[in-house]
Image (tube, helix red, strand yellow):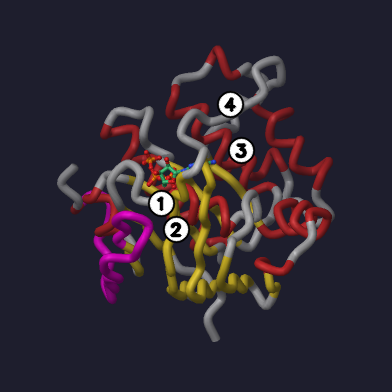
């Protein structure tokens, strides 16, 4: 059975007298434990899809089902619980708390989740066992992104949503971060969705949604996704 299902999902915004269809009749499925990419130019609707999937926004029409939860019908309170228990987030600019150490940033997950993974163990998995007591300002962009990956995974979510996770990194560091997201998520059995405008990243994915003007232009499947080393950036 499919793990994530979008059925004719729409998200309209009303600005002045204008209606903007940020997402316009989108349908797709992702399977549990897969690595997926949503690809498209600026304004294509990628972040809106991610926000709908993550329960930060609600559709104006259509149906979203995740892990047997009907997300599209949830109240605000149910959405808060859904975001807390089901979703880990990785953002382009890391969103770490500046006056907390790496370890304390990851431990935040323990405070809000019912079934967290060990913060030290997650930092070890991302290769930062020696940097636990450093503050974000003492770390490189790649290291900060690794802390944010550890934080997302420490919540022990079913799904990890990443919005341009390599957007602020050089290509070498970006590759390492992508490999890390894929390997750790695979080891822990998580489903990953990465939003990007960087087309080569899509070659790593099992499923690629190509978005244009709020619609899906194409859905591409890779039976044998490429390894990050094989991708020409
Ligand atoms: N809160 C909002 N209010 C009004 N319009 C919005 C809102 N959020 C998004 N939009 C519009 O919806 C469309 C899709 O936006 P979205 O952010 O999903 O695109 P995107 O593909 O993620 O772009 P980018 O790569 O630039 O982040 C755009 O035209 C955008 O201006």
228 part of magenta stretch: yes
Q: Which residues are magenta?
A: 210-229
Q: Position of residue 97 (x, y in %)?
A: 67, 23
Is residue 158 placed above or below 1 in the rendered structure?
above
The picture quadrant for ligand 1 comes to top left
Residue marked by disc 1: 45
Instruction: Report how far apart the C-alphas of labels 4 and 3 lie in the structure.
Output: 9 Å
Give the residue at x 49% y 43%: 17
Q: Which residue is mark 4?
A: 130
User: Does residue 12 appear to the left or right of 123 in the view shown?
Assistant: left
Q: Is residue 86 above or below residue 106?
A: below
- At 38% from the left and 28% from the top, the residue drawn is 168
**In the rendering, at what x and y percent does residue 113 appear?**
80, 50
What residue is disc 3 on? Answer: 123
Asked whether mark 2 and ligand 1 are closer than 8 Å, the reply comes as yes
Which residue is nearer to you in this view: 211 or 13? 13
């Amino acid at each position: 059975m499919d793990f994530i299902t979008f059925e004719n999902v729409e998200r309209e915004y009303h600005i002045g007298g204008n209606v903007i269809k940020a997402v316009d009749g989108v349908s797709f499925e992702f399977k549990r434990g897969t690595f997926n990419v949503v690809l498209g130019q600026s304004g294509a609707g990628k972040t809106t899809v991610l926000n709908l999937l993550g329960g930060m926004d609600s559709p104006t029409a259509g149906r979203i089902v995740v892990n047997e939860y009907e997300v599209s019908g949830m109240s605000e309170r149910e959405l808060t619980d859904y975001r807390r228990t089901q979703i880990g987030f990785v953002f382009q600019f890391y969103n770490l708390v500046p006056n907390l150490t790496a370890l304390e940033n990851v431990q935040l997950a323990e405070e809000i989740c019912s079934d967290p993974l060990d913060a030290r163990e997650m930092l070890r998995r991302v290769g930062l066992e020696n940097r636990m007591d450093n503050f974000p300002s003492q770390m490189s962009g790649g290291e900060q992104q690794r802390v944010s990956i550890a934080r997302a995974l420490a919540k022990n979510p079913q799904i990890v949503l990443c919005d341009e996770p390599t957007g602020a990194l050089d290509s070498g560091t970006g590759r390492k971060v992508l490999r890390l997201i894929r390997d750790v998520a695979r080891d822990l059995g998580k489903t990953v969705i990465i939003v990007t405008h960087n087309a080569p990243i899509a070659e790593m994915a099992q499923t690629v949604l190509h978005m244009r003007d709020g619609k899906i232009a194409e859905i591409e499947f890779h039976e044998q996704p490429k390894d990050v080393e094989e991708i020409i950036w």
